[in-house]
Image (spheres, helix red, strand yellow):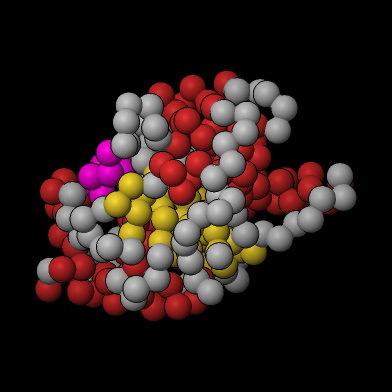
Amino acid sequence: MQTLMVYSESGGATKTTTAVSLAAVTAAQGREVVLIDLDPRAASSKWLDAQPKEDGLHVGAILGDPDPVGWAEELAVPTDWFPTLRCVPSARNVSNREADRADHAELRLKTSLEGIQADLVIIDCPNRQGGPLTLSALNAADTIVYAAAPTVDGADGVDGARRSVEQFKLSRRRIGAPDNLTEAGIVVGAVQETIMSRIAVTSIDELRDTGLLLTPLVPHRTIVQEMRLTHEWYGQYRKGAPVVAAYTQLAEQVIR
């Protein structure tokens, strides 16, 4: 099983779109996928219309329990998009977990994945620097995909995220712990294909200089945002086909 986290330290970086899209195109191929919404904004959960089985049975329950072995499998709920796509939903009060300084709290998400029935787990991370939520994702994941919009903030968000990842890896090495995190690359979404602004060109060039930029760039299509409001998969509509094609090619590069 592969566990992939989608990360940026900037808002509006197409992070949720990237996480949901990679999950959807993989599930569409018949592979078992679980999307874990670790963001208190619950954007992925809302888009998928994923509701907890009972009040409180969201990702916060995992993060708040000292021994949540196997809980991800228990809390994952089906979606209407694909029979092979499930979601562990989030909620606003998950932000309370940022104040949790209990010993080894950052390992609870990883512990919850034991026994999960999935080929791929994708974690939609909050756009925050460090903290228990980000550390939980870093400890649980083996693969990182950075998400960026073609903006100054988008490039800055990747730069900050990469710094946080490097600090995490350094801390692991200092204590002699295994470091199995792979930076799979940077996905740039919502790119205007026709007339690209100077800011967009400069931001993409900056991301390319990292050596991690993945192609194709994901084109902007209004239908993606429209479908977030209606809880639908844009891939079922012709207008969404170019975006699906881009994420399908990207998935082939980052998903084992």
State the residue in front, 220 or 39: 39
Check residue 47 for magenta coloring: yes
Q: Where is residue 101 shown, x and y percent of the image? A: 66, 23
Residue occupying the point 42% across, 55% down: 34
For residue 246, say whether it is visible. Answer: no
Left or right, residue 109 beside residue 119: right
Q: Where is residue 118 shown, x and y percent of the image? A: 47, 61
Q: Quadrant of residue 151?
A: bottom left
Check residue 151 for magenta coloring: no
Left or right, residue 250 beside residue 48: right
State the residue in front, 181 or 102: 102
> Relative to residue 73, is residue 32 depicted above or below?
below
Residue occupying the point 48% across, 45% down: 72
State the residue in front, 147 or 58: 58
> Relative to residue 248, is residue 139 depicted above or below?
above
State the residue in front, 174 or 188: 174
> Relative to residue 248, is residue 153 depicted above or below?
above
Left or right, residue 104 beside residue 86: right
Q: Where is residue 232 shown, x and y percent of the image? A: 17, 55
Q: Which residues are magenta?
A: 45-51
> Relative to residue 39, is residue 32 depicted above or below?
below
Left or right, residue 14 beside residue 210: left
All told, the count of numbered labels is 0
For residue 90, say whether it is visible. Answer: yes
Q: Where is residue 159 shown, x and y percent of the image? A: 57, 51
Residue occupying the point 49% across, 76% down: 253
State which quarter of the image contains the N terminus: bottom right
Residue occupying the point 46% across, 48% down: 73
Q: Quadrant of residue 17?
A: bottom left
